[in-house]
Image (tube, rainbow, N blue to C red):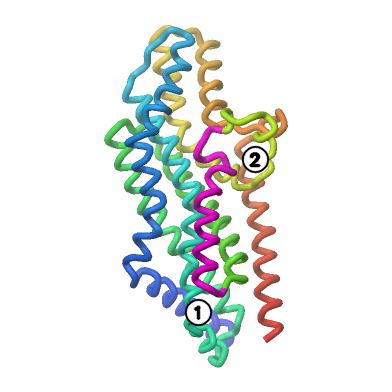
Amino acid sequence: MNANFAELKKFVSLVGRNTKCYFKDKFTFFMSLITPMILFVLFVTFLRNVYIESFNSIFKQINVTVDKVLIDGCAGAWLMSSILSVSAVTVGFCSNVIMIDDKINSSVNDFKVSPVKGYTVSLAYFASNFLVTFIVLLSVMLIGHIYLACIGWHIPFTDALMIIVDIICGILFGSLIAGIVGSFISTQGGLSAVSTLVSSMYGFICGAYMPLSQFSEGLRNVISLLPGTYGVGIMRNHYMNGYMQAFSEELSSLNVPAETTEQVIKAMRDSFDANLYSFGNGIPLGAMYGILLGTCAVLLTAFIAIVFIKNKKK
């Protein structure tokens, strides 16, 4: 019992040490924020009107005009769901820099001769990576929510809480992948190459940057097999639910028939990936969570196995 408690104290100390090392370098923290911030700036300056026009085109089909503030807010919410779901993975890779730096600087060798078990060191890297990514994403979320509050806020309190839960699920997924990949990387160049590859490709292959409705049916079916797609899907739901309800109320106030309103809301949810489909079958929100967390369970098992094998060899 005392031995386990002592190991737990060492684990907590290592997590604190790794986290402090990360935030000690202000430039590293800035680099973690730069990708989501670039996406944010690109949206506001270039892509905002494209998404707004997409929303307007749906309402033009039934010859109604809805509140511009509501459309602006919904487009912004769609953007935030994209940024946070992608950053949960991409920032996770950037935050893994402490583990790689310790390998490069041979600091990890100090742990090998200290009275700290190897698996404690590995789990501390993972836990610190999770914590750092969570702090970075909360910072991004705060900036995004200030923006949404300025242009049109329609996110219920329960959905706002669930967004944080979605962030945690996404970070768990991203940190596990980063931990597994990082265990085989021992150079800064290798980490930079992998981080660049993930940052440039992940948003496209999980349907975050472009609605899946814009892709061919075959490509949509392939993307629906990737668990990261459902990390985006759960975030889309909780960011857009309040806006869909507000649109429904707006259409009702304009005397649009209830059946037509339901069709319009469904069309919007389908077009902007709040509803996800795999080979023509709708995926319920609970199933999205199940797929994402089930994948995390598999990744966690793989991560533990890698940690066990690496420490057994030593």
Q: Residue at x 51, y 61 (%)?
A: 93
Q: Residue at x 58, y 87 (%)?
A: 3
Label 2 neighbour load within 10 Å: few <14, some 14-19, many 20+: many
Looking at the picture, how far across and down is residue 31, in whole percent?
A: 38, 60
Amino acid on which the number 2 mark rests in the picture: Ile
Q: Is residue 143 or residue 108 the one in the foreground?
A: 108
Looking at the picture, how far across and down is residue 10, in whole percent?
A: 50, 82
Quarter of image, res 298: bottom right
The span picked out in magenta is 186-211
Quarter of image, res 270: top right
Instruction: Please state which of the two labelled residues, at mark 2 or mark 1, is closer to the viewer.
Output: 1
What kind of secondary structure does the magenta stretch mostly adopt?
Answer: helix
Of the 4 image quadrants, the one containing the C terminus is bottom right
Q: Residue at x 37, y 54 (%)?
A: 34
Kindly give the residue lying farthest to the left in the view shown: 150
Q: Is residue 165 visible?
A: no
Amino acid on which the number 1 mark rests in the picture: Ile
Q: Which residue is mark 2?
A: 223
Looking at the picture, how far across and down is residue 126, in whole percent?
A: 54, 68
Q: CA distance from mark 2 to mark 1?
A: 36 Å
Within the magenta stretch, is there residue 300? Answer: no
Of the 4 image quadrants, the one containing the N terminus is bottom right
Q: Residue at x 63, y 52 (%)?
A: 293
Assess whether mark 1 and mark 2 are in contact (beta carbons under 8 angstroms): no
Looking at the picture, how far across and down is residue 192, in whole percent?
A: 49, 64
Q: Which residue is mark 1?
A: 104
Q: Is residue 71 left or right of residue 7?
A: left
Identify the element where label 1 is drawn: helix
Identify the element where label 2 is drawn: helix
Q: Is residue 242 visible?
A: yes
